[in-house]
Every structure is written in structure tokens, then in C-alpha cells.
Amino acid sequence: MKWDAWGDPALAKELSADIKGLLAAALGVTGDAAPGPSADEVVLHPSRLSAEDLDALAGAVGKEHVSAADADRLPRAGGKSTPDLLRRRSREAQDAPDAVVLPGSEQEVAAVLAVCAERRIAVVPFGGGTSVVGGLDPERGGLAAVVSLDLRRFDGLLDLDETSGEAVLGAGLTGPAAEELLAERGWELGHYPQSFRYATIGGFAATRSSGQDSAGYGRFDEMVRGLRVVTPAGVLDLGRAPASAAGPDLRQLFLGSEGTLGVITAVRLRVHPLPAVKAYEAWSFPDFATGTAALRAVEQQGTGPTVIRLSDEAETMINLAMTEQIGGAPAVSGCLAVTVFEGGAAQVAARQQLTRDALLAAGGTSLGEGPARAWEHGRFSAPYLRDSLLAAGALCETLETAASWSRLPALRAAVTEALTGALPGSLVLCHVSHVYPTGASLYFTVVAALGEDPLTRWGTAKRAAGDAILRTGGTISHHHAVGADHRPWMTEEIGDLGVRILRAVKAELDPAGILNPGKLIP
Ligand SMILES: Cc1cc2nc3c(=O)[nH]c(=O)nc-3n(C[C@H](O)[C@H](O)[C@H](O)COP(=O)(O)OP(=O)(O)OC[C@H]3O[C@@H](n4cnc5c(N)ncnc54)[C@H](O)[C@@H]3O)c2cc1C
């Protein structure tokens, strides 16, 4: 992963002539932004760890698994939000973890936590490094120093129970590595967030991630059957049976805990046999309201698509401009919806027919397979476009929320108004990304001229959007999690008593307060 951009440098995306034309016409962006520093030119604040601290950490994990070198600290200095990327490109001295520690067993994680509690060192668990909410900020929280605890050595398929359809996966496995290990045995997890190629099993659990196939296979937290978590107070092994009435479900405390309560080392997950058949169908709707009502009908009737999503008019137009780059989908007007179906042949045919009936009845027009296949082909490429936009002088950032169906129109209007109010002249795109019987998630993309001081301008826009979300009945995050960026809204989200409960749990599990300070819990 590039330290100052998304993904693999070889997959960097050129802006098409259409997109360049749109940028110039809509935002007045025609030039290139000033290039950022090279990795060698970046200045990090020096490590605050003493030689004794480093020796103690080496005692826990072995000398070769501790590094205070800038080349290791820089890639763990934060996540991959646009503000993260802008901060990485700064020529001012930057914050970074004081060292990187790579444990290889639960005993080593426990030993690192003990060293850090004794020496007052904060610990930021690090999975794939794809957080977009400041979840990896190297915050010391009043302690002496901070280390990044990289989980990449937890990379095994530890068990596959083919009778029950359950797999135990190491927390440090990336999405592709997990799917490869399962596919060798004929199984699939089916969790495909846009960050799939880099994000990890532990990170998915710690952030309650949601993938693009969540209509069919569920959110990541719905796939979790069990968790192993190392905390400063001891190890927890949660989830004994497919369902249980033995009190509150403690797994829920760690799903979404974002490294503040413990370190997830392994996750037991529901898996399914690789699908025999896959079918695609794209749809057009005259407007977003009609399309949204159609998706609601599908979800409430339970017709069973694996993927279903709907873009608004502006996003449909941009997708079209991008789709041409990846090869030839038909022109689409109005709002584009994509459906994909997976499973056995008869099951797929039946589900597709039921979904087709519901979408036709709700005013949709079938566009055939093409645009749906094109969407799937390009579904992990969009983040590369953000880098090209930044390089061309345009700020591009996303945010997401969810609410019940009845509240979605007001929520969408309020967020759009908040964003365009704070960033006049910006382009705001929206899609329905995840659906539930009672509501859906809205995902916004904002493109604006980078201009002077983009970090402050985006901060103002983000505050306005967050306030609008809470005011209109949405959640501050449907799947990106809370981190540092959404923490200011947590009291409003869960109430003062809710915050006190989280603080009490943290005090019990992490009495020295070493685990990921400044995130999630106000
Ligand atoms: C381009 C892009 C697209 C994205 N698309 C999606 C999407 O479609 N759906 C979605 O849900 N999210 C998406 N995200 C957000 C992000 O990828 C998810 O939050 C992901 O789950 C984070 O996983 P990770 O392994 O990278 O975790 P990291 O970013 O490394 O960490 C995230 C948080 O979890 C904690 N953590 C990580 N591993 C552990 C562990 N083993 N134990 C305890 N705490 C841990 C960290 O301390 C941090 O607070 C996207 C991000 C980017 C940059």
C-alpha cells in the first residue's frame, strides 16, 4: 500500500477527458496541485521511546519484530481518509507512532500490553491501515509514547468446520488472503467492502464493516460467530453456539470497539460454499425517489439479491464517464441500480425473477447485464480516482450514514445542503449502498476545488454534515465507524449514560488507558 495514496502504484488511474472536462466546467479545476514530498523528504517527530522501552518491547516479541525506523513508522502514521492523505503530504513535521510492534501470538500480544501498561505507552492496533475516520491516529492520550501494534502475523485459516459452515480466520488476514485460503477448500466469506484488497479480518470486526454484497451475505458483524480478544485484563473467547440466551451478547462489545477495549486475534465466521452461478442485471429509474422506493420494495418483500444499490442522477453520470474507461457499457440516464445474484442455478433464477417483478412494478427499466458487470469490474478502482483528483487539484471525500426508510429523503436533503453550504460549488453525489427491511444506508461523495487550506474547509463541511445527520435521525456511521473523527457526535448518538457504560467497560478491561486513546469513547 502506498504511504500517501491508495493501493498499488501500478493501478493508479488517469483522469479521462470527460472527467477533466467535468472538473473544469463544474469546479473550475484545470491544473495540477503542488506535488507532495517524497517519503524520504517527510519529516516525522522523533520517536519518544527510550532504549529501555524498545528493549522491553523486543523482550515481548523479539528484536526483529520491533522497529522505530521512520520507514516503518510513516506507513502507520494514519489511515486513508482524504484528510489523512493531505496530512501525509505536508512538509511540516508529522506525528507518527513511536515504534511499530509485530506480535506473532496471543501470548506476545499480552506481553506487549503488559509492557505498555507498565511503561505508560499507548497502543494503536493496526490491521490494513484503511481507516477513514482517524481510527489510527497516533494519539498518546497523555501517556509517554504510542506504538502501532501491527496484526499482520495473525494470517492463518485456523479452522474450517465444513459441517457447520464456520471458519476461524486470523485477525491480520487481508480480504483477498482470507478468500484465497477459503476458496482452496471451496468456500467463501463474501465480504467485499471497497477497501477489500487491503483491510483485514480484525479490522472488519473492530469497525463493524459492511461489504457490497451485504444484502445477500450480511454485514461483517452479522457473519461473526465468535471472537478471541486479548485485553490488558485477560483473554476473552466469546461465542459458543449459533444462538444463545445466556445473557447479553458480549461479542457485541468488541464488534465496533475499534481497538479501544482489546486486540482481536481471531474471528470465527459464517462461510458459504463458492456460488455455482452468478447473474447480473442493471436497472434505470427516472429519479432517486422512485429508485429508492423500488429498493425498499425488494428488501421488504425479501426477494433476495446478493448486491443491490442505487446511484443518484449525478453519480450515475459520473459512473458512466468512468465506465467508459473500463470498457463499454451502454449509456444510462436517470438513476442506475445494480443487482447481482449468487447461489445455485434454480435459486438464482427464482430470486432474479422475483426481484425483476418488484423493480418493474416500481417503475424500473431493465438495462440488461452490461452496466452491472461493468460496476463489478471497476468496484475496487474508485479510490484510485480520488488520488488522481487530488493530484489535479480537486478534493474528493466520502461520508455515510443510515436511517429508516421514512427518514431517508429528509436526511439526504439535509446532508446535501450542509455539504454544498460549507463547500459552495461542490459536487455532491449520493447512492443507497446497503438496504434493510426498515431502512438503508446513504453514501455521499463530495468533490470540490482543493483551494486554500482544504483541511479546514473539509473540517467545516464534515461538522455541518455530521450535525445534519444527527438532526434528521441518521446514525453518525453506518460502516466507517467512529474513530477520532466521529467521536464528537457519540454522546448524541448513544446518550450520556451510554458513554458512561463504555467508559466503565474500558476501565475494567484497560485500567491504564493504553488502548487506542482518543477514539470512539468521548
Ligand atoms: C478506499 C476505501 C474504501 C472503503 N470502503 C469501505 C466499505 O465499503 N465498507 C466498509 O465497511 N468500510 C470501508 N472503508 C473503511 C475501512 O476499510 C474499514 O473500516 C475496514 O474495516 C478497516 O479495516 P483495516 O484492517 O484496514 O483496519 P485499520 O484501518 O487498520 O483499523 C481500523 C480500526 O480498527 C482497529 N483495529 C484494527 N485491527 C484490529 C484488531 N485486530 N483488534 C482490535 N482493533 C483493531 C484499529 O485500531 C482502528 O481503530 C473504506 C476505506 C477506504 C480507504
Image (cartoon, rainbow, N blue to C red):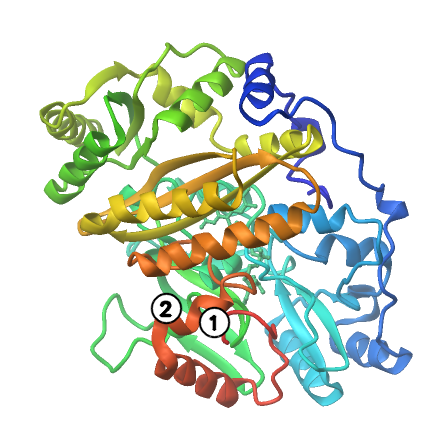
Judge left or right: residue 75 versus residue 434: right
Is the distance from the Cβ of mark 2 to the nearest ligand 1 atom less than 8 Å? no
Earlier in the chain: of badge 2 and badge 1, it is: 1
Judge left or right: residue 5 versus residue 202: right
Residue 166 or residue 520, whichever sits in front? 520
Query: In this rendering, is residue 156 above or below 449?
Result: below
Residue depicted at x 31% and y 27%: 338
Quadrant position of residue 33: top right
Query: In this rendering, is residue 338 above or below 445?
Result: above
Query: In this rendering, is residue 269 above or below 386?
Result: below
Q: Nearer the viewer, mark 2 or mark 1?
A: 2
Q: Secondary structure at mark 1?
A: strand
* Residue picked out by circle 2: 493
Q: Secondary structure at mark 2?
A: helix
Q: CA distance from mark 2 to mark 1?
A: 28 Å
Residue 164: image location, x then y, percent: 29, 56
Q: Which mark is residue 343?
A: none
Is the distance from the Cβ of mark 1 to the nearest ligand 1 atom less than 8 Å? no
* Residue picked out by circle 1: 228
Residue 385 or residue 389, whichever sits in front? 389
Residue 242 or residue 3, whichever sits in front? 3
Residue 272 appears anywhere in the view: no
Residue depicted at x 72% and y 82%: 143
Q: Label 2 sits on what residue type? A: Glu
Few, some or many residues within 10 Å of mark 1 (<14, 14–19, 20+) = many
Q: Label 1 sits on what residue type? A: Arg
Residue depicted at x 25% and y 82%: 247
Residue 311: image location, x then y, percent: 35, 31
Judge left or right: residue 189 versus residue 341: right
Residue 290: image location, x then y, percent: 19, 30
